[in-house]
Amino acid sequence: MIMPGKSLGVFLYPDNFAGAELSDYARRFERLGYASIWYPEAMFYESFTVGGFLLSSTERITIASGIANIYARDAVATLQCSRGLQKFYPNRYITGLGVSHKSLVEDLRGHTYRKPMAAMIEYLDAMDAARPKLAGEDTPLVLAGLGPKMMELAAARSDGVHPFNSPPEHTRWARELVGPDKWICTAQHVCLTTDAEAARNAARRALDFYFVTPNHYRNWLRVGYDRSDLENSGSDRLIDALVAWGTEAQIRDRIQQHFDAGATQVIVNTIRPEAKGSTDNNIGGHNFQSSPDWGVYELLAPVKPNA
């Protein structure tokens, strides 16, 4: 089943890793029994190239773009890419689409960032128009969504919604908006430490980008936080809502809160706790917020290592 209910996925940031590392990571996640690997499209690899590579490196695990930027390719190219992956790797790929962020669309790609809803509706309309002209079968489709209009659009025109940086109260609200049958595949950051200072410092550094991206900070305001929570890289209240830290039991409880609120799948993203006094952003040459913490993934794994 490509999207089993109340399942655990993982978040993998590909840009900082070579192919051999990505292959190894994907196979390790598969052995640990995770249902899926979600990956973003950011500053290096093209989305469907990564998807095909991860599929070729594994045998069973679902691979999902979380998300492919609609400004990176036209609707026909997206259908060709996703239908190609469906042909080569049947029922193992989920196409996740999103409008991305203004900085990644205008500064990086040189496009004009349009109103998100208008841009996504036009893109979905173009996909609908192209479908009868192209060979192959679609993969499942989900839309990145945080606000009510985008989530309602996802419910109407896709298999579900993919929120990011959202606490359980957002998941509950999303379920009310999309109805009982659509997927909600939401991400949850985790940091395995009982040291509050270390966890919050690491969380603030990992999430720094999102505090200046309007679609994310507006979402936090929408679900009950206020402008004071956005100051100084995030209040303790907001940081603790976005990043589950503490013991294994506390982290599992946060994941369960998402399931209780209506999540179909919780996508785990590990953040390594910051060593006291550390100013080093790198672990083994990789950005500390994107290098998998295997101790945590093994602890939460559906299939225990060496089982």
Image: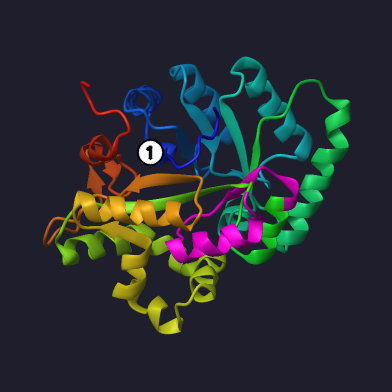
Q: Is residue 197 depicted above or below 193 in this figure?
A: below
Q: In the displayed structure, does residue 129 sit left or right of residue 23?
A: right
Q: Name the residue rendered at 48%, 77% in the picture.
A: 224
> Relative to the observer, which residue lies in front, 237 or 203?
237
> Relative to the observer, which residue lies in front, 267 or 200?
267
Q: Give the crowd class for mark 1: few <14, some 14-19, many >=20 residues within 10 Å.
A: some
Query: Quick one: quadrant of the N terminus?
Result: top right
Residue most extreme to the left: 276
The answer to whether residue 103 is magenta is no
Whether residue 113 is visible:
no
Q: Position of residue 206 (x, y in %)?
A: 34, 57
Whether residue 18 is visible:
yes
Q: Name the residue rendered at 33%, 59% in the picture.
A: 243
Q: Position of residue 164 (x, y in %)?
A: 49, 55
Q: Position of residue 188 (x, y in %)?
A: 39, 52
Q: Name the residue rendered at 38%, 38% in the picture.
A: 16
Q: Is residue 261 depicted above or below 86 in this figure?
A: below
Callout 1 secondary element = helix
> Relative to the observer, which residue lies in front, 269 or 21?
269
Q: Is residue 29 depicted above or below 159 in this figure?
A: above
Residue denoted by label 1 = 16
Tell me where the magenta segment starts and ends, as one range. Answer: 156-180
Give the residue type at disc 1: Asn
Quarter of image, res 7 = top left
Q: In the displayed structure, does residue 102 sit left or right of residue 300?
A: right
Q: Position of residue 104 (x, y in %)?
A: 57, 54
Quarter of image, res 113 = bottom right
Quarter of image, res 87 = top right
